[in-house]
Image: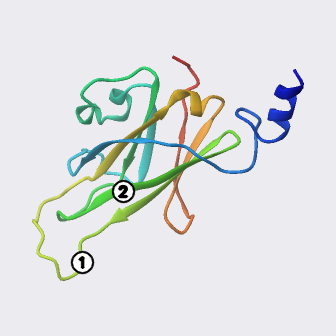
């Protein structure tokens, strides 16, 4: 019992610690045709189908929590979404992302694209998390999403 109390006092799992903890994630891939026109936005779901990016996952894993990030509509090819890191602070997940654009002098296909990326994390690492926030590299908030509370 004493060790459990010490673990909680030192910022152990589920303690509500305000020290950011890196959350490992699995990259399931990107698409340039997500069909999500409004962006940036993020969707968190217990299954890949909840994110609208199920085609990026061969087999869904009920022990994973899926996070889809969408850039919104772009007028050319060459755009992408890149999730750099995920951190947990208390009951909040912070997803840091880069929205990549082609160089101004690049030759790009002239077609409307809707870039997105899908990643997943171990659902246990999100236990007790209520909300996820999407941040750009400078720490500016881009979007928020609710995190489902059910456990596998």
Lateral position of residue 108 relative to residue 34, left or right: left
Quarter of the N terminus within the rendering: top right
- Residue at horizontal 12 percent and vertical 70 percent from the top: 108
Considering every residue shown, the one lying at the far bottom of the view is: 105
Say which of 12 and 140 sits in front.
12
Q: Which residue is mark 1?
A: 103
- Residue at horizontal 38 percent and vertical 22 percent from the top: 61
**Residues at circles 1 and 2 in contact by the CB criterion of under 8 Å:** no
Q: Which residue is mark 2?
A: 82
State the colouring used for the structure image.
rainbow
Q: Position of residue 124 (x, y in %)?
A: 57, 27
Say which of 85 and 141 sits in front.
85
- Element at label 2: strand
- Element at label 1: loop
Lateral position of residue 117 relative to residue 78, left or right: right
> How many residues crowd around disc 1 within 10 Å: few (fewer than 14), some, or many (20 or more)?
few
- Residue at horizontal 38 percent and vertical 29 percent from the top: 50
Q: For residue 149, which quarter of the picture?
A: top right
Question: Residue 54 got which mark?
Answer: none
Lateral position of residue 5 relative to residue 66, left or right: right
Considering every residue shown, the one lying at the far front of the view is: 3
Is 100 drawn above or below residue 123 in the view shown? Answer: below
């Amino acid at each position: 019992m004493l060790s459990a109390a010490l673990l909680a006092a030192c910022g152990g799992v589920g303690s509500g610690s305000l020290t950011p903890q890196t959350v490992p994630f699995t990259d399931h891939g990107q698409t340039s045709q997500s069909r999500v026109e409004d962006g940036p936005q993020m969707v968190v779901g217990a299954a890949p189908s909840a994110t609208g990016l199920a085609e990026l996952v061969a087999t869904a894993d009920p022990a994973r929590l899926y996070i889809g990030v969408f850039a919104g509509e772009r007028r050319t090819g060459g755009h992408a979404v890149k999730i750099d890191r995920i951190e947990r602070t208390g009951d909040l997940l912070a997803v840091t992302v880069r929205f990549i654009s082609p160089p101004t002098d690049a030759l790009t296909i002239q077609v409307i694209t809707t870039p997105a990326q899908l990643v997943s994390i171990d659902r246990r690492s999100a236990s007790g998390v209520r909300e996820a926030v999407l941040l750009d590299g400078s720490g500016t908030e881009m979007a928020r999403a609710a995190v489902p509370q059910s456990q596998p």
